[in-house]
Amino acid sequence: MNKYYLLAIALLGVMYINAQDLVYKIPKEANAVASLKGENLIELFPIQEFDKTKVGKEILREATRNRDGQQSVADLGLDISSTGYYFYQITDSIKYHCMLMPINDVQKFEKLIRKGKIEEEEGFKINYREYSKESVIAWNDKMVLSVTGEIIESYFTDNKVRELYDLPEIKEGENGDEELGKYLRDDIFEKWAQKEEITFHYVKNKVDQILNTPITNKQSILANREYVKTIDKKAEASIWVSDFMKIYSDVMKGKMSRYYSSFLYAGMDQAKYERQQFSGHVYAEKDELKMKATYHLDKKMASRMKKVYGNSLNKKFLKYINEDEILGYASYVIDTKGFLTEYPKMMKNNLGGLFETEADIITELLSIVLDEKAISKVIKGDALFVMYDLSDKEVTYKTYKYDDDFKQKEVEKTRTETIPDFLLLLSSSDTDILKKLLKLGEEKGVSSYKDGVYTLKHRELPTELYVSIDQGVIAVGTTLERIKGLDTSTKNVSQKHRKILRKNSGSIYINTKEVLEIAKKFERSKRKKRTLDYIINDIEDIQLTNGKVRNNKMTAELKMKLPEGHKNGLKYLMTLIENLDK
Amino acid sequence: MLKNYITKFIILAVLLSLTSCFEIIEEVNLNKDGSGDFVLTINLSQSKSKITSIMLLDSINGHKVPSREGVQQGMIEVLNYLKKSKGIYNVTKKEDYENYVFSVQCSFKNINSINNLTKEVLGKQKVKIQSYNTYQYDVSNKKFTKEYTYDSQLLKQYNNLSIDNKKIFENASYTGIYRFNEQIQSVSNTKAKVSKSKKAAMLRVNAIDLISGHTKLNAKIQLAK
């Protein structure tokens, strides 16, 4: 008995959630879903506070123009404490862009509708403008739905379909081209209004389907396991794309049908893509702001990507970094051999069945011409670019001295210039070719060699560059000490940065405070200086990482820790925007 | 791709960190009969790091960066123009792309021939300056006159520049040197210096004063009779 009781409560709970949350209205076949969680946002940033912000005031001003002024964004009739959804659905005949949001006061909401025609249909009201009927807003007591339809013209080239919509038959012309009366084949519709009416018909059906037709859980997106797996309740905003390669090829086909031959996009259908999903989330947590994007690759692609992004950044690079002095860094790791062998295969796959023999020949030829193994010895594929502080450097310049008779004499003087100090590190297990190149540079007077360091000096370089080759690490930079790895006294890399650099296939780190301090030095406008001062005091380091392939997924993350004194990421962001706009 | 980004980033960082300035030198060597030589030099050597960086870019602040070939072509155009100008001969040029120093030199039979030359030469390089110099030498009275016409557009154009571009003019200077065979008796411009031998006068002003119109380049030089 107890078991059944619990089951009943659980079911009721699910039903209650479903009644509140409009996700169940999204069809299982949706190709992309985005959501904005009102409840999370309101918890992080109460609506009363939002009303006082510039954005809040602007929304209120716009929404209540010429009407009795509502006092709060919460009074607009929309249930902003719920989740709002956007979804995209593509069928063989039309693409739908839909937005769904719950309503808590339909009278208040209706006051927001000011333009266009309002028609009362069974179970809902619909608002649209006469000259753009492909976009409608429809609502009932519980929710508002906006639908924009976009016809896929190629679908309407089939004469059987045309008959259904009373469109004239397309006949083959004298010169073999298909003709539609006096129009060309590309003009699928005789008049713009025809297309608009057909779109309106589709859009209205969609509205009816979503607002009036009962939908079971099995038919909703909640029955799509892949979507459900990506749901993250902690995220403030989320996006999910079921198969981005399909969307890409559909969009391309839609665009190309008017301008290109069917031959090209016939190949796209044959491109051997499997489902590749994408999901992204935004988190405004207590201590950090975070964006996370995940590519869910198919098995084949994942195994290829594993080969391309299989390597880790050379450990020896860390010896060259002095974390206390860095302004930022960027790292990138690929496996050159993996890249050279897998990339042509990926290109061939992208072409689908098109030019199959040609693609085979090119792939083979590339493999013969490029010795992947030998190239990967010379360039292993990992690189680390470190930006240090700006340093002073003496440079010479020409000017003139005048004697007592003002006769001119050319003299060389020196001046101090501030040069950015950077270091670029690359891995190589075969440095012979580079050494030979540098030797050639010596003969040509471009480089010189002393104590294990090459100095490159050329009029086309803004500053001298130093190059060292040591234990498979090629270091290129502007400061001799850093190139030699002599800067040992304060050399250290924290566990945090070791992890970022070693565990990811790519990363960018910006020491924001320091970078902005430098920008301030070059800023003259007092207003901009004040803004920079504000940001410097209210910003923390930014990091972007691109992870390796794990469980057929690749994840990119953008993070910023919150400065002290901010309750959460959203409050921080809103305050920052408000202050920057002052 | 990454290499490109890094290269662009370095160049932009270099540009951000470098100060720049330049000097323009105008020299007139006048003989007793009113003939002489004229040299115009633009010395960008103090900004060479910045120019080297700029030359690596395709465009900066929306302006197209000329290539070295473009600059060379411009110099040839200037030279050809001067060669065709009446009363001017022995036209030569000097180009130093390591230090970015460029000069054109010519001889004249009468100093009137070089009137507006600076304006025309800069105009050929699409630098529209309405301020210009005219020279006169009265052989019988031994009086050299330099008239400078200031155009207020100069200040307007300068004020329209961004702060970064304005910085270029901060330490820029204009130097005019006038050498004679006879001694100088008097110079009307109080800012001009007379050499020890009294056979040369020099007028050095900073570009900002010239642009704002605070300093005039007018000078009447009376030579000993």
Image (spheres, rainbow, N blue to C red):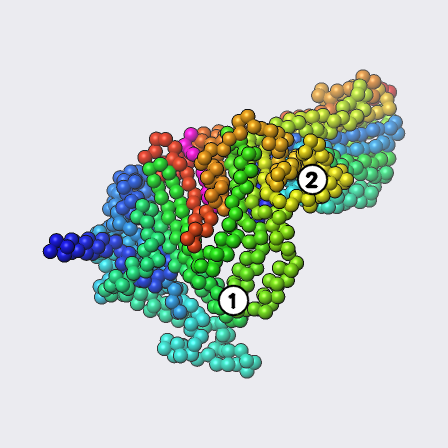
The image position of residue A218, as x and y in percent, is 27, 63
Q: Amino acid at mark 1?
A: Gly
Give the percent coordinates (x, y) of residue A172.
50, 81
Please report the residue visible at 32 percent of the width from the left and 42 percent of the height from the top: A56
Q: Position of residue A487 (x, y in %)?
A: 58, 28
Pointer 2 local density, CA inside 10 Å: few below 14, some 14–19, many at least 20: some
On screen, residue B79 above or below A352: above
Q: Is residue A545 magenta?
A: yes
> Can the viewer see residue B162?
no
Q: Position of residue A538 (x, y in %)?
A: 41, 32
Q: Secondary structure at mark 2?
A: loop
Question: Mark number for residue A460?
Answer: 2
Position of residue A280 relative to residue B30, above or below, is: below
In the image, A124 versus A278, the foreground residue is A278
Q: Residue furthest bottom?
A: A174
Side (left or right) of B15 relative to A215? right
Q: Is residue B188 above or below residue A43?
A: above
Residue B47: tell me if it is visible. Answer: yes
**Amino acid beneath label 2:** Glu
- Residue positioned most to the top: B196
Q: CA distance from mark 2 to mark 1?
A: 45 Å
Query: Which residue: 43% across, 54% down?
Result: A552
Q: Quadrant of residue A297?
A: bottom left
- Label 1 sits on a secondary structure element that is loop
Q: Name the chain letter of the residue that bears numbered label 2.
A: A
Check chain identity for marks 2 and 1: say if they share one. yes
**Along the line of sight, which residue is nearer the eye, A149 or A476?**
A476
Residue A142 in which image quadrant: bottom left
Seen as rendered, the residue at the extreme right is B33
The image shows a total of numbered marks equal to 2
